[in-house]
Each structure stands twice: as structure tokens, then as C-alpha cells.
Image (cartoon, rainbow, N blue to C red):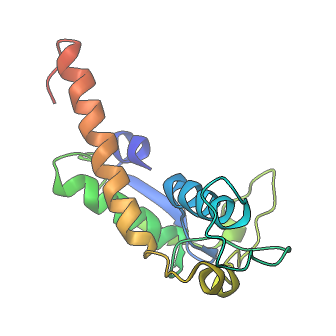
Amino acid sequence: MLRLAETREEIQIVDDQWGAPTHVDLLADVTLNLINISTPGLGANTSRKPPAWGIYHCASAGSTSWFEYAKLVINTAKSVGAASVCQRITPIPTKNYPTAAQRPLNSRLDTSKLQKTLGISFPDWRESVVTTVREILSQQHSLDLNHGKSS
């Protein structure tokens, strides 16, 4: 999205596919928590019953369309002086954006079992998106300065 926003005046984004962008840090933290409560001798709380075997879904809280996701990414970038070329983000249906792989319209996951097992709530997807965009742009700015460019 950031590259497109620096090269295209208008970006068309699918607005009928739903999911929850999930940062790898959340997945890593949850995995470590599950290991810690499941593995005696490796940090497990032995007074706590290990979680039941099965499938646990992990995703950030809330849900969004690709269009809403793109708007947040690009507007966050614009707030720090990036994504200057993009002037319009236009929603389109999936049928107007053909791809080799078919995508489900609804890829939202029910994370209640995992949250109950861990006794935690997951952060809203927006938090990690804003943080990630700012980190990426900060790193790009540092790289540009180190290579004699200014942005």
C-alpha cells in the first residue's frame, strides 16, 4: 500500500473482503504464552491446567475490509508526510479485481477460545497497523539519510 501510495494518484481497493490484519508480534507472543502454560519446566505455571488440544484461532480484535485497511495505512503515512502521490482511494468489489488465487469474502476468525484459554484480550487491529506504518516509514527515512537522500 505504501509503495502504491507513492506511485499512483488513485488506488482501487477491494471493499467486500473482511478480515483482521494481525501483526506477527501478536502471533509470537500468543505462541510463547501457549508454550509457557503447556510445557512443564519451561516456564509453565504448574498450578494451572494446560490448555486442551485443538484448533485455536489468533487474530487482532475487530475486523475490516481491505479498503478500510488501505485508508488507515495511507492516511497514517500522509500524517507523517509520506504517500504524497495518492489522492484517491476508491472502493471496488472483488469481481472487479481478478486474481489468480480466489480469496474468501469473509476470513474473520473467532478468537474467543484462545482469549479465554489465555485470560487475555487481543488488541484492535488498528493499533498495530498504525505502529507498523510509522516504523516502516521511520526506517525508510533513516535508510534514505544514510544513503545521502532526504525525504
Q: Position of residue 54 (x, y in %)?
A: 85, 74
* Residue at the spot 28% in from the left edge and 41% down from the top edge: 137
How many circles with numbers are drawn on the protein?
0
Side of 149 where 90 appears, left or right: right
Side of 103 where 124 appears, left or right: left
29 shown above or below 69? above
124 shown above or below 151? below
Rendered-image quadrant of the C terminus? top left
Q: Position of residue 119 (x, y in %)?
A: 55, 83
Q: Position of residue 33 (x, y in %)?
A: 59, 63
Q: Residue furthest right?
A: 54
Q: Quadrant of residue 39?
A: bottom right
Q: Quadrant of residue 88?
A: bottom left
Q: Quadrant of residue 10?
A: bottom left
* Residue at the spot 22% in from the left edge and 27% down from the top edge: 142
* Residue at the spot 50% in from the left edge and 54% down from the top edge: 25
State the residue in front, 127 or 6.
127
* Residue at the spot 53% in from the left edge and 80% down from the top edge: 63
Side of 3 where 17 appears, left or right: right
Q: Residue furthest top?
A: 148
State the residue in front, 96 or 30.
30
Q: Position of residue 87 (x, y in %)?
A: 28, 57
Q: From this viewpoint, is residue 68 visible?
A: yes
Q: From this viewpoint, is residue 88 visible?
A: no
